[in-house]
Image (tube, helix red, strand yellow):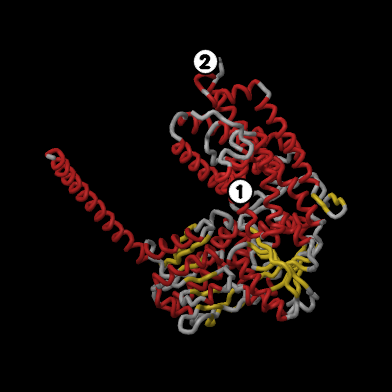
């Protein structure tokens, strides 16, 4: 029983971070329809920004977090302006290839600058965990869960309740009509990609200190983000959040009670199951086709 | 109909022109390759280095390559081999078995190296092995520890790192002292990890120690909390962990966060204990590690003079001390291959393969002399390196005698 409770606690802290990864990608992949292979690199980037700001510039941990988010926003905007804007309107394959190229180039750049040796970021949280009866959890991970929850709520309201969010949804439903209604389409493209990127960087900045930081850390994270987005339904923020928790639960229970060797396969099994039984994702709203 | 045949005619004329041009450029390239390639061949003796410089094992592979460069520079400073400069042809296998095989093929067929060193991970080395058979080229294996490498009957394999069975045998002597009763395993899900679990389980059972659950983790996995939560609930007192330094760091931190208080012993020799202490902090205290090199206690190594030289050179080049436990393998590996070339008297694969059986050099971790391992008639070479047990206490490394 105590093992089961521990798995549930693990699921909560892991699910929060998966949800954060998922909502960033669902904006870009789901709403903008860009198969964003740089999502994992932006996650890595956020983590390295934390490392630089905390260790090389000596800035406080809590100040470094928003800086990493801003840095992710700027890098995302730069990618949109230089790579995606010239490609707007070209087919999905071309964009995908360019994004794969950007992913490889940026990952190799990280390796070139910082080398392959993993870095770790020290945090102001105590090393001793919070012990609640038979289960325990680290303070850092509780903080990460809280920060992720905050970012998720902010993003939800930004997309579903704000004027900017309304303009975003309108733009990607029908660009011409949105433009005729006075929406600055160029600005919306850049800001959507930048917001999605800043969320990836935020996830990296929060999780970098939990794990260790190395150039390939984003690869598995990106794979999981895609699984979560497909699970929750493209472009659905609530779906991505629930998808994140479902994936975490599947991994925890799969590793705990089935076989740990298949832990990271759970994400793919879920994608396959969803694509067979409910190809629009578990929480997709019914959509007009054509 | 008419148009069609015209088309064909025009196309075939075009094709002919194309082919002529292609032939001309190919022969020009071939000529250039013959001229320049030939010239290069006359000046240097090449050793192919097949290591992970990107991907999950980038840090370790880079350490090994840097160790290899120290050996090459040392050899060249002393006049090279057979009167020629030694040249390392270094290729990145991207921590990916498919790439490792492709790199081996490229090194052998295009760079014409007569001997290879590689390929760090067991799965990487196993992927390279059929290529060695195909091109009849020997390889010095510097890091891999899966038993399969020397037992499948590949006569081109010469391994200087200890297979997990040698590690297990060395560990056998101390299990009574550690009072092991029941152990669990947490191993990386590849040939290295699974092979270690197998060999150590066998040894444990011989000693009457119960083996509980065997958990695995993927090569790039970062969150092992699920596995550790499960191990926290079992009734064993010790966990044997096999993986490289980054995952070890994560495991120690996550085990501490889960309040898991069992004894952890790691195997495989890719722990870089200094990096673990720096990154896992207090969580590393009390952990024990089976390692194959003692850079902290050069005087206790089998070859103190060479060890001191190597460590001094490593520091002089500005590399991180933590990398020593990996890089010495590259240093020893290149010296092994170079000694065989010297002994063979010529840089040819068959002669080097034969000479590898006759070398006897002082490695940083014991004498490198190859003994036969594997099925009769197609034995692989295996040297008998030392294995040590160290313990981290209060952020310091201490030696436990085996």
Q: Nearer the viewer, residue A198 or A162?
A: A162
Outermost residue toward the bottom in this view: B376
Report the chain holding disc 2.
A
* Image location of residue B328, percent across then percent down: 60, 67
- Badge 1 marks a residue whose secondary structure is helix
Residue occupying the point 64% across, 57% down: B320
Q: Is residue B352 above or below residue B13?
A: below
Q: Residues within 10 Å of mark 1 (few under 14, many from 20)?
A: some
Q: CA distance from mark 1 to mark 2?
A: 41 Å
User: Looking at the picture, does residue B85 appear above or below residue A128?
Assistant: below
Residue B29 placement, left or right of B317 = left
Determine whether, in the image, residue B94 is placed left or right of residue B243. left
Mark nearer the viewer, 1 or 2: 1
Identify which residue, B110 or B305, lies in the foreground: B110
The residue lying at 42 percent from left, 72 percent from top is B133
Report if residue A200 is visible in the image: no
Percent coordinates x, y for residue A44 in the rendering:
62, 44
Placement of B58 over or under A140, stated as above or below? below
- Residue A182 point in image, percent of width and height: 55, 15
Residue named by callout 1: A270
Q: Quadrant of the N terminus of chain A?
A: bottom right
Name the secondary structure under disc 2: helix
Would you name the residue on which mark 2 appears?
A180
Earlier sequence position, callout 1 versus callout 2: 2
Mark 2: few, some, or many residues within 10 Å (few <14, many ≥20)? few
């Amino acid at each position: 029983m105590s093992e089961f409770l521990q798995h549930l606690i693990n699921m909560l802290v892991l699910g929060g971070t998966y949800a954060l990864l998922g909502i960033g990608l669902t904006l870009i992949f789901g709403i903008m329809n860009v198969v964003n292979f740089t999502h994992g690199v932006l996650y890595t980037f956020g983590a390295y920004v934390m490392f630089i700001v905390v260790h090389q510039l000596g800035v406080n941990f809590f100040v470094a977090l928003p800086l990493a988010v801003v840095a992710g926003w700027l890098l995302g905007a730069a990618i949109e302006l230089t790579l995606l804007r010239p490609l707007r309107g070209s087919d999905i394959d071309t964009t995908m290839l360019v994004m794969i190229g950007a992913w490889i180039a940026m990952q190799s750049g990280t390796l070139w600058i910082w080398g392959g040796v993993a870095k770790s970021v020290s945090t102001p949280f105590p090393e001793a965990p919070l012990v609640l009866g038979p289960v325990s959890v680290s303070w850092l991970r509780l903080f990460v869960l809280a920060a992720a929850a905050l970012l998720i709520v902010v993003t939800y309201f930004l997309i579903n309740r704000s004027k900017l969010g309304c303009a975003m949804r309108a733009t990607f439903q029908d660009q011409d009509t949105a433009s005729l209604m006075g929406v600055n389409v160029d600005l919306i493209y850049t800001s959507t990609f930048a917001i999605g990127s800043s969320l990836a960087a935020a996830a990296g900045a929060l999780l970098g200190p939990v794990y260790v930081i190395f150039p390939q850390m984003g690869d598995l994270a990106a794979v999981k983000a895609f699984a979560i987005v497909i699970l929750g339904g493209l472009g659905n923020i609530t779906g991505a959040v629930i998808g994140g928790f479902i994936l975490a639960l599947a991994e925890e229970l799969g590793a705990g009670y089935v076989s740990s060797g298949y832990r990271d396969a759970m994400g793919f099994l879920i994608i396959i199951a969803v694509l067979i039984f409910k190809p629009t994702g578990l929480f997709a709203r019914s959509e007009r086709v054509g | 109909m008419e148009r069609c045949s015209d088309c064909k005619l025009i196309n075939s004329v075009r094709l002919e022109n194309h082919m002529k041009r292609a032939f001309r450029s190919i022969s020009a390239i071939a000529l250039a390759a013959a001229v320049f390639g030939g010239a290069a061949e006359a000046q240097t003796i090449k050793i192919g280095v097949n290591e992970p410089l990107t991907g999950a094992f980038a840090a370790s592979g880079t350490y090994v390559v840097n160790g290899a460069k120290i050996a090459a520079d040392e050899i060249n400073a002393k006049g090279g081999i057979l009167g020629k400069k030694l040249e390392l042809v270094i290729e990145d296998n991207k921590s990916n078995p498919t790439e490792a095989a492709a790199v081996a093929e490229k090194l052998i067929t295009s760079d014409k190296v007569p001997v290879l060193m590689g390929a760090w991970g067991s799965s990487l080395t196993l992927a390279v092995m059929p290529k060695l058979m195909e091109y009849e080229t020997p390889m010095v294996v510097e890091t891999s520890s899966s038993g399969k490498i020397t037992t499948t009957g590949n006569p081109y394999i010469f391994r200087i790192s200890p297979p997990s069975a040698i590690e297990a045998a060395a560990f056998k002597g101390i299990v009574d002292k550690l009072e092991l009763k029941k152990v669990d395993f947490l191993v990386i899900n590849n040939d290295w990890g699974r092979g270690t679990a197998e060999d150590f389980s066998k040894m444990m059972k011989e000693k009457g120690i119960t083996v509980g659950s065997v958990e695995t983790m993927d090569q790039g996995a970062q969150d092992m909390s699920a596995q550790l939560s499960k191990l926290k609930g079992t009734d064993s007192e010790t966990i044997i962990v096999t993986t490289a330094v980054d995952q070890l760091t994560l495991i120690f931190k996550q085990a501490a966060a889960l309040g898991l208080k069992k004894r952890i012993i790691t195997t495989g020799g890719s722990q870089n204990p200094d990096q673990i202490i720096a990154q896992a902090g207090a969580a590393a205290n009390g952990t024990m590690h089976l390692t194959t090199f003692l850079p902290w206690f050069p005087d206790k190594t089998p070859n103190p003079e060479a060890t001191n030289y190597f460590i001094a050179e490593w520091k002089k080049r500005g590399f991180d001390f933590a990398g020593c436990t990996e890089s010495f393998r590259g240093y020893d590996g290149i010296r092994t291959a170079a000694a065989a070339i010297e002994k063979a008297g010529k840089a040819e694969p068959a002669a080097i393969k034969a000479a590898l059986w006759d070398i006897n050099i002082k490695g940083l971790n014991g004498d490198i002399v190859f003994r036969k391992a594997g099925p009769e008639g197609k034995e692989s070479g295996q040297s008998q390196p030392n294995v040590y047990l160290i313990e981290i206490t209060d952020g310091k490394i201490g030696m436990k005698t085996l």
